[in-house]
Image (cartoon, helix red, strand yellow):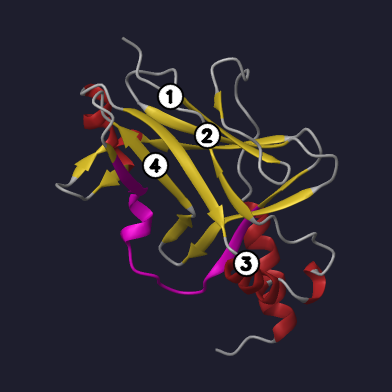
Amino acid sequence: MKLSLPAVMAFVAAFASAQQPQAPKSSTASIAWGTPVNGIRLGASFGSDPAKPTLRVVFENVGPTVQDVLIGTKTGRGPIYDMKFIATATDGKEREGLHISAFSSVGGMVVPIFVRLNAGEKSDLEFPLKEIVYTSPTTVRLDALVKQGYSVRVRFEVKQASADWAKQQTAGDWAKLSWPWIGTVSSGEVSPAR
């Protein structure tokens, strides 16, 4: 079945709008914020339900204008986020992990996932700790590292090449987007409750 360009663009627009991250669920008091870069700052906090341990990642527009932030890609197998999860042991050694979706093969259409943030607006994502995986020197999940006392921070990066690709995918009806935010931003360090 061959789809016309307008049909594909309508599908992409509907799909991307359905992928918008959720509004923040709680106050910002427990969020470990990083330093803003180009009007965006990133924060992280552990979820409040010990039965379902999660890591909450919050994007905030601290600038004066609307920011469209490319947070990853959506594939036929699910989202792949442009985030790295840096776990730090009590002795200072670091491990770099990814959400398990980054290890899956790409299937089907690939479209950008973005979040539009008005000035002062926040948006967040929540990741189960067991879905954040570290592969070097051994494979381990973040939930196990947190039990060992590791702290974690999140690093998010959008390169110019990724932004150019997203612009191409969102041409036409999406020309009004202020694409893109470019930069590398990190959250503050969050430690497990003792």
State the separation of the CA atoms marked 1 and 3: 29 Å
Residue at label 2? 187
The label number, if any, that marks residue 160 in the structure image: 3
Upstream in the sequence, badge 1 or badge 3? 3
The label number, if any, that marks residue 85 in the structure image: 4
Check disc 4 and report its element: helix, strand or loop. strand
Name the residue at the bottom extreme: 2
Labelled pair 4, 1 in contact (Cβ < 8 Å): no
Circle count: 4
Labelled pair 2, 1 in contact (Cβ < 8 Å): yes
Upstream in the sequence, badge 4 or badge 2? 4
Name the residue type under label 3.
Gln
Name the residue type under label 1.
Val
Residue at label 1? 190
Residue 149 in magenta?
no
State the separation of the CA atoms marked 4 and 2: 10 Å
Upstream in the sequence, badge 4 or badge 1? 4
Q: What stretch is highlighted in magenta?
A: 95-114
Name the residue type under label 2.
Ser
Disc 3: CA contacts within 10 A as few (<14), some (14-19) or many (>=20): few
